[in-house]
């Protein structure tokens, strides 16, 4: 069954601990934490200090989605703060190979994210080093954007390569995921749905989460 990773970007930042506890107790499989640095993307969100503070509110594994340049400079801080998975962007400035090495040497699971315009072939050589490949279904930067249906082909391609090479890398998607777009992703072979506004913005969060989990 598909796993669901609520994106905290759409949670209430004034009550983050409460939202983290609530969504974890409701059965989230992972928590997706969007880190933006004002350089790789224009927006600025949260850093290791916040991750460390919310860690005590949840037993669910944290996936830190680093939308930052030079992730090799900060990956170890995100590991120390309690991220279980750390995902860096192939498009970021800096040294992604070194970043993956730092993540693994910190005892954490490593992920690589890929933006909509970047062809999947760019990350193929990294696959054996990856626990997660994060396929962006919007251009990163903000919550609440529209799912880009052309990403479905990339999910299918990732599924094929991972299965052909008998790898255990999980495929996660992120951006504009709701019950309809999530269905498309599941049909194309995704393992984890990250979703922000469709869960935290729903009148009944538990219902929205359960609906995604049942796809
Ligand atoms: C976008 C972030 C996403 C975002 C998802 O740059 O990486 O994780 O929070 O939010 P929704 O589900 O609202 O598109
Ligand atoms: Zn994200």
Image (tube, helix red, strand yellow):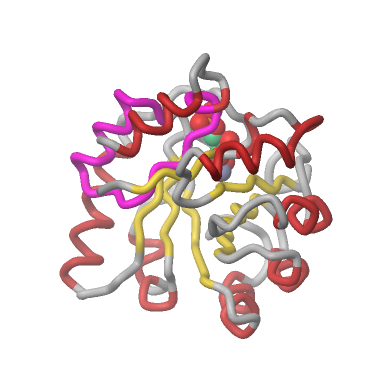
Q: Is residue 32 above or below residue 137?
A: below
Q: Is residue 178 magenta?
A: yes
Residue range highlighted in magenta: 177-199
* Residue drawn at the location 25% of the way across and 32% of the way down: 183
Visible residue check, residue 140: no
At x 45%, y 50%, the residue is 29
* Residue 167 in view (yes/no): yes
65 on left or right of 30:
right
Q: Quadrant of residue 193?
A: top left
Q: Which residue lies at the image location 56% right of the left edge and 20% below the top edge?
A: 201
In the rendered image of this protein, does residue 100 appear above or below residue 23?
below
> Foreground: 3 or 69?
3
- Above or below, 18 against 171 in this view is above
**Is residue 164 a member of the stretch shown in magenta?**
no
Residue 80 position within the rendered picture, expressed as x and y whole percent measured from the top left: 74, 71
Residue nearest the observer in this picture, 117 or 113: 113
Q: Position of residue 191 (x, y in %)?
A: 31, 52
User: Where is ligand 1, by quadrant?
Assistant: top right
């Amino acid at each position: 069954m598909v796993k669901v990773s609520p994106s905290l970007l759409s949670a209430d930042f004034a009550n983050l601990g409460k939202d983290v506890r609530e969504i974890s107790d409701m059965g989230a499989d992972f928590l997706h934490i969007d880190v933006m640095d004002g350089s790789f993307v224009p927006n600025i969100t949260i850093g290791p200090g916040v991750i460390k503070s919310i860690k005590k509110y949840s037993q669910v594994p944290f996936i830190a989605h680093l939308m930052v340049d030079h992730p090799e400079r900060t990956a170890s801080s995100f590991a120390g703060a309690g991220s279980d998975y750390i995902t860096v962007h192939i498009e970021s400035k800096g040294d992604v190979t070194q970043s993956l090495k730092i993540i693994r040497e910190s005892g954490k699971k490593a992920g690589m994210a890929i933006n909509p315009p970047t062809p999947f072939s760019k990350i193929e050589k990294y696959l054996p080093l990856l626990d997660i490949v994060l396929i962006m279904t919007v251009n990163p930067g903000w919550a609440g954007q529209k799912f880009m249906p052309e990403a479905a082909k990339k999910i299918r391609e990732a599924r094929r390569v991972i299965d052909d090479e008998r790898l255990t890398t999980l495929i996660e998607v992120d951006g504009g995921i709701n019950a309809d777009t999530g269905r498309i992703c599941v049909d194309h072979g995704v393992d984890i749905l990250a979703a922000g506004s469709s869960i935290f913005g729903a009148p009944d969060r538990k219902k929205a989460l359960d609906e995604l989990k049942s796809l």
